[in-house]
Amino acid sequence: MTNKTIIAVDAMGGENAPKKIIDGIEISLKDNKENFFLLYGDVSQLNSLISERPAIKNYCEIIHCDEKINDEESPLTAAKKNNTTSMWQSIESQKKGKSQITLSAGNTGALLVLSRLILKMLNGVEKPALAGLWPNNVGMNVVLDLGANIECNDKNLIDFCYMGTALYRALYSETSPKVALLNVGSEEIKGHEMIKKAYQYFKDTKSNAFEFCGYIEGNHIMDGKVNIIVTDGFTGNIALKTAEGTANFITKSLKKSLGSSLLSKFSTILSYRALKDFKNKLDPRKYNGAIFLGLNGPVVKSHGSTDAHGLAYSIQMCNKIIKGDLIKKIKENLNN
């Protein structure tokens, strides 16, 4: 396994697991054979699925787990199961030095609590943040926090700026990305006290890790003028769900309109390539995979309802995170 990125996978997490997990691995290996997967889950189910795909057998090792964490379970219930679950053992594999990163499509609350319990927080970081990718007019944004923390103080927001910058640099090799705080206006007087304090901190303290661009409003998230957008988890989660719902509404409405008449169907044929590009741009699977930042090891959360192609994109993110040396970059940013 020399030079392989070793990914610990909670193979029982998410809808249609473990089949979706194995399908996603198979898709990912068609483009990138740099990864090796430690699959934590039911050995009989996993062996049955892998035996049907001999091409991926040499890229996987199965570790049997007696239990899994269900989506409806509370984080406290999940924690009480200790190391009997596939989620717990996949996270713990990092602590034991067996893997470099953990991937799960399971219960988000449980994944956060267990990750924090097992891996602990980086020195000086009070709260983890859930960071995700968000398309813009010229490329991609990193947006955080997307729901790990309902309330944040100014130090949390400052830490998120440094950690989000490290993630962007790890994924895209950008040396001087641009950071903005999501706010209700672009003027200095706008916003609550915590965001004003974070703004003032960066106004008074020049960072070598990124260029601070002040405030950004929600209608400018996709302009592409900044790379990292920082907010609290309450606001970030609402913004994310609103964007997902809007994209889904536009796609469905367009599809309905284009099939409403013979003329519309003919226009669809003529505009096929443009419509295909449009659909591809809004495909949520391409942006699947959010990462908990602030822990002593990287943990990626795949959307539970995504399909195998979406999971393959999460695997791609895992590879980039390790190749980009994310944890080292976060430590460097926080210590500067």
Image (cartoon, helix red, strand yellow):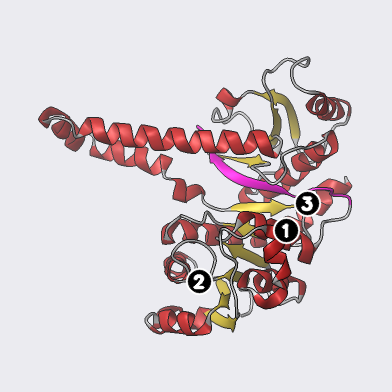
Q: Amino acid at mark 1?
A: Val
* 96, above or below 267, in the image: below
Please name the residue shown 64% across and 31% down the image. 226
**Going from the N terminus, do you reach mark 1 or mark 2 first?**
2
Q: Position of residue 333 (x, y in %)?
A: 81, 47
* Horizontal arrangement in the rendering, residue 266 relative to residue 149 (left or right): left
* Horizontal arrangement in the rendering, residue 193 relative to residue 224 (left or right): right
Disc 1 versus disc 2: nearer the observer = 1
* Horizontal arrangement in the rendering, residue 191 relative to residue 9 (left or right): right
Q: Amino acid at mark 2?
A: Lys
The crowding category of the residue bearing disc 3, from other C-alpha atoms within 10 Å (few below 14, some 14 to 19, many at least 20), is: many
Between the residue at mark 3 and the residue at mark 1, the CA separation in whole angstroms equals: 21 Å
* Span of residues in magenta: 124-138
Q: Which residue is mark 1?
A: 113
Secondary structure category for the residue under label 1: helix
Front residue (pair 265, 55): 265
Q: Which residue is mark 2?
A: 33
